[in-house]
Amino acid sequence: MTLLIKHLPLWFKILIATLCITLITSLAAGELARRFEYNYLTNNLTSQIQQTFNILSATTIDSLITEDIPLLETIMLQISSNYPDVEFFAIYNELHTVLVTWGTLPPEASLQHQVFQQPVSFGGETFGYMKIAVSTASLQQDITEHVNLIRLLIALILLCLALTISLLLHSSVLKPISNINNRLLQLSQFHHTGEQITLVSTNELDRLNESVDLIQEFTHKQTQREQQLQIAKEQAINANTTKSTFLATMSHEIRNPMHAILGALSLLNKSEMSAEQQHFIDTSLKSANILLGLLNNILDMSKIEAGKLQLEHRAFNLQEILQNVTSVLEPLAQKKEITLNHTCNTETPLWVLGDDNRLAQVLINLTNNAIKFTQQGQVDVMMEAIQQANHTQLCFTVKDNGIGISEHQLKHIFDDFVQSDSSFSREYGGSGLGLAISKQLITLMKGSITVTSQLNQGSEFIIKLKLENTEAPVTEQPMPQAPVVTKDTPAHLLLVEDNKANQFITKTILQRAGYTVDVANNGLVAIKACEKQRYELILMDLQMPEMDGFDATKGIRQASNINTNTPIIAMTANATTEDRENTLAVGMNDFLMKPAREDQLIKKVRHWLN
């Protein structure tokens, strides 16, 4: 029974409770009304009987003294005829002897009668007694009818009040509770994917409690998920940090030997060799440059993924970019006997703001691919510019009539490490990173790159950009320079480098260029050397044992050191922007990234020596 009541709906419980309260209240109110009216009517009856006794005492005292029985009987008959509720009437003398009597005296325990007795006296002397028994059946019947009517009215009033309260309670309490319960249930159902949730209780409050329990359970699970996600996030951050550290370390470790390889090959390329030996050197240089390009691509992709690749914002000429791209790749096209054309829809110099190096990188990559995958015919690099008030709409098109790309491969052509065919990497070479990096760079420039192609008919890459217009930078007139005085003694340089191979190659290149070179294996040796000898230029590696290049530069820049104003060029395999900023922050003057070609190294040295 208790279990049944527990699962009854709340509105039904409230209705049952309201009906029970209405019934009990109406019964209690009727009983109170009955008692009140019974007491009131009984008192009224007693008062009427008392008045009747007073009247009879005045009219029968003479007959009672003389014991006039006929007259007393006449009075008794009048009373019985005028008062139908009187069932017994008797008159006694002072000795309690019955003089006249009428009717039957009811038993004393009767609840349907009331018996009244009063002495007949005058002047303080009692001459007899009168006794009357009155039936209260009609009186009680009237009281019962009145009480039932009162109970009915009270029940109707309370029932209407209860229904009104129930409706108000349902609209203001039960319905909102039911809506909240349904929403909580939907929320719980939503977060328990694939699991059907059924609430056992039919009572609104119990269902609400069950839904809250489900939400609490979900919150607990959600907290656990968040903790797991936080742990996974920390692991991902650690993994990303580890990857960045690994790439930085690998970049340094690969670039150092690459510097020695490219330098050695460059030196060998200038020596007299047989045709076969020259072919070996050319092949080695080509392979080394391909390896260096792959390394640069991997670093670029890593920067893009980490969100650390920052674009420059400087003025440059669009026509110069187009000409530089074709001039760089013209030898490759001529070697394959392919015509390389470039066109522009305007001859007016167009100056815009942006990253010219990255734009050139994308165009060189697309044009290089076009030449690579074209066996005969031509490659066209076209630029269409629409100059407006504040910006220029650009459309670069690189078109070839090479091997083309299949429709299926076009969907993934800009994905990482993807080529149109796996056999191409064996025939043409490449890692598949160039197009992915190009896509990312153009996206960073807030532009778009698309491709259309057909097998054996060629491909067409289209780049759309919007760059801000600017004026051509004002070039200052160079100050007249004093004539260069040729020194009898060559410039004295200090090379701070811990790698033996790089020491040998860099020192050989500088010596062949006519310079005197001292070598320091680490920063401590470099500081001691700078305290004894004045140098005209210092080439400083950054990562070295005992003391790195940063601390060595700080030591050299001390006021007590005789080389405090000597130009210092950072010559390092670290390729990050932070490294360049840090070198300038500690007092270095310039940055040269390894592996540096021979011409780059000599150009940088001559610049600072002059």
Image: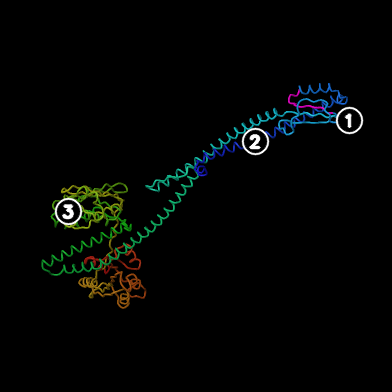
User: Measured along the vertical axis of the image, is residue 523 above or below residue 413?
Assistant: below
Task: Tell me which numbered mark, 3 or 2, is placed earlier along the sequence.
Answer: 2
**Residue type at tag 1:** Gly
**Residue type at tag 3:** Phe
Q: Residues within 10 Å of mark 1 (few under 14, many from 20)?
A: few
Which residue corresponds to mark 2?
Answer: 29
Q: Which numbered circle lies on residue 123?
A: 1
The alpha-carbon separation of the residues under discs 2 and 1 comes to 49 Å
Q: Residues within 10 Å of mark 3 (few under 14, many from 20)?
A: some
Task: Tell me which numbered mark, 2 or 1, is placed earlier along the sequence.
Answer: 2
Helix, strand or loop at label 2? It is: helix
The number of discs equals 3
Q: Nearer the viewer, residue 329 or 300?
A: 300
In percent of width and height, residue 96 lies at: 84, 30
Which residue corresponds to mark 3?
Answer: 373
Colour mode of the rendering: rainbow
